[in-house]
Image (spheres, grey):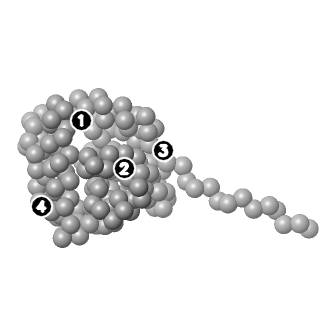
């Protein structure tokens, strides 16, 4: 499986919506109310406008989606040392691609000379929390669902656990000292 991650355009929003809908339905079938039944189109279009909505392709086929933002004051305050992952979803037929998407996001953090990759998940989603922890993410706090957030509208009161992972910079290649 060879993945590519491409900036999503307005024409990709129906595909992104379909991926998010599938992921939301799958989670609900497992008793997890992680996301709303349908993400608002204006939220996705705002991510298109900000060029932070991505389509994940597996050998050219749409396999997933992720939003990678460079600021997130609502959840993370005023931080300039991190990238922030939201709405990472993978189609069931492409299970396993999520790790590669997170590795791609880490590369983007390094490319922007930042130190952390941050994300959040519902406090009640023990399986996803364990998954992130196994990938090296550390819980650093929690936040109550903000008013006006799509999750709050869909599910009422909720709490998210905030996770971050330090992403080491790529070391400069080693070069021997010149001879005298």
For the residue pair 65 and 79, the one nearer the viewer reads as: 65
Q: Name the residue under label 1.
A: 122
Marks 4 & 1, CB-CB < 8 Å contact? no
Residue 176 in view here? yes
Question: In the visual, does 23 lie left or right of 57?
Answer: left
- Of the pair 142 and 92, the residue shown nearer to us: 92
Relative image position of residue 49 (x, y in whole percent): 22, 68
| Front: mark 1 or 3 | 1
Q: What label does residue 34 carry, if any?
A: none
What element does badge 1 sit on? strand
- Whole-angstrom CA distance, mark 3 to mark 2, is 21 Å
3D distance between C-alphas at marks 4 and 2:
27 Å
| 163 and 74: which is toward the camera | 163
Tag 4 residue: 42
Element marked by disc 3: strand
Q: Which residue position holds label 3?
A: 166
Separation (CA) of disc 4 from disc 1: 23 Å
| Image x and y of residue 112, in percent | 46, 61
Residue hosting label 2: 97
Secondary structure of residue under mark 4:
helix
Residue 111 placed where, x, y %?
48, 61
- Judge depth for marks 3 and 2 and give the one in front: 2
Q: Is residue 64 placed above or below 139 in the rendered structure? A: below
Q: Which is more N-terminal, label 3 or label 4?
A: 4
Query: Residue shown at 24%/35% (left/top)?
Result: 122
Q: Residue at 23% x, 70% y: name it.
A: 9
Distance between the alpha carbons at the discs numbered 1 and 3: 21 Å
Counting from the top left corner in percent of width and height, residue 180 is at: 91, 68
């Amino acid at each position: 499986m060879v993945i590519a991650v491409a900036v999503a355009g307005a024409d990709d929003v129906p595909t992104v919506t379909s991926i998010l809908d599938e992921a939301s339905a799958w989670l609900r079938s497992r008793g997890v109310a992680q996301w709303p039944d349908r993400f608002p189109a204006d939220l996705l279009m705002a991510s298109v406008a900000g060029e932070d909505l991505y389509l994940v392709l597996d050998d050219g086929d749409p396999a997933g989606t992720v939003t990678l933002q460079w600021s997130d004051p609502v959840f993370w305050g005023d931080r300039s040392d991190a990238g922030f992952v939201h709405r990472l979803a993978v189609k069931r037929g492409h299970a396993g691609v999520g790790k590669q998407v997170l590795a791609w996001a880490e590369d983007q953090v390094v490319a922007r000379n930042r130190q952390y990759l941050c994300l959040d998940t519902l406090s009640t989603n023990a399986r996803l929390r364990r998954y992130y922890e196994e990938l090296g993410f550390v819980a650093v706090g929690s936040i109550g669902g903000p008013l006006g957030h799509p999750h709050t509208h869909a599910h009422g009161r909720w709490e998210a656990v905030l996770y971050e992972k330090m992403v080491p910079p790529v070391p400069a290649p080693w070069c021997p000292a010149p001879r005298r």
